[in-house]
Amino acid sequence: MNYILLFGMPGGGELFFIVLVIIMLFGSKKIPELARGLGKGMREIKNATGDIQREIREGARDINTAKDSVDVEKQVKDLIKEDKEQQQEVKDEKKESDSFTENEQQTANNEQRTSQTVQRRGPYAPEEPKTSTEKS
């Protein structure tokens, strides 16, 4: 089992051998240039990934602002709420007009009753006794 864990990990002797092969292939003068090129390449990769991440964040921010300005669900809910309020106002007005017409009908009925009682009394009928408030 230990042999499997060490399979991909070079030890000290292997690292020395790898460095020796690199020096023999490229020479001592080319190694610093290769290191500089490798560093520049890594820096460009980091900058590119940073730019990509920045563009993704800006795109997500733009989408969120557009979504907030065109929030269809919110607009539909507002329209439904306004419609319910208008229906409630119509119902209230109808109730008020119904109660108003009922009051008018009651008044008309009372007047009719009063006129009927007055009509029933003959011209020679005795007057009803006055109450204490009417005497003054």
Image: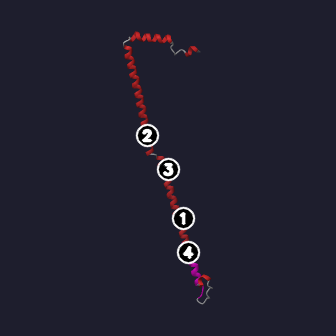
Mark closest to the chain's N terminus, 1 or 4: 1
- Callout 2, which amino acid? Ile
Mark closest to the chain's N terminus, 3 or 4: 3
Q: Nearer the viewer, residue 95 or 61?
A: 61
- Callout 4, which amino acid? Thr
Q: Residues within 10 Å of mark 3 (few under 14, many from 20)?
A: few
Asked whether the beta carbons under mark 3 and mark 2 sit within 8 Å of each other, the answer is no
* Residue topped by disc 1: 95
Taking 111 as reference, is 35 left or right?
Answer: left
Q: Quadrant of the C terminus?
A: bottom right
Taking 8 as reference, is 126 left or right?
Answer: right
Mark closest to the chain's N terminus, 4 or 2: 2
Asked whether the beta carbons under mark 2 and mark 1 sit within 8 Å of each other, the answer is no
Mark closest to the chain's N terminus, 3 or 1: 3
* Residue topped by disc 4: 107
Q: In x, y percent, where is residue 122?
A: 59, 88
Q: Give the residue furthest to the bottom.
A: 124
Q: CA distance from mark 3 to mark 4?
A: 45 Å
Residue 77 has which mark? 3
Range shown magenta: 104-122
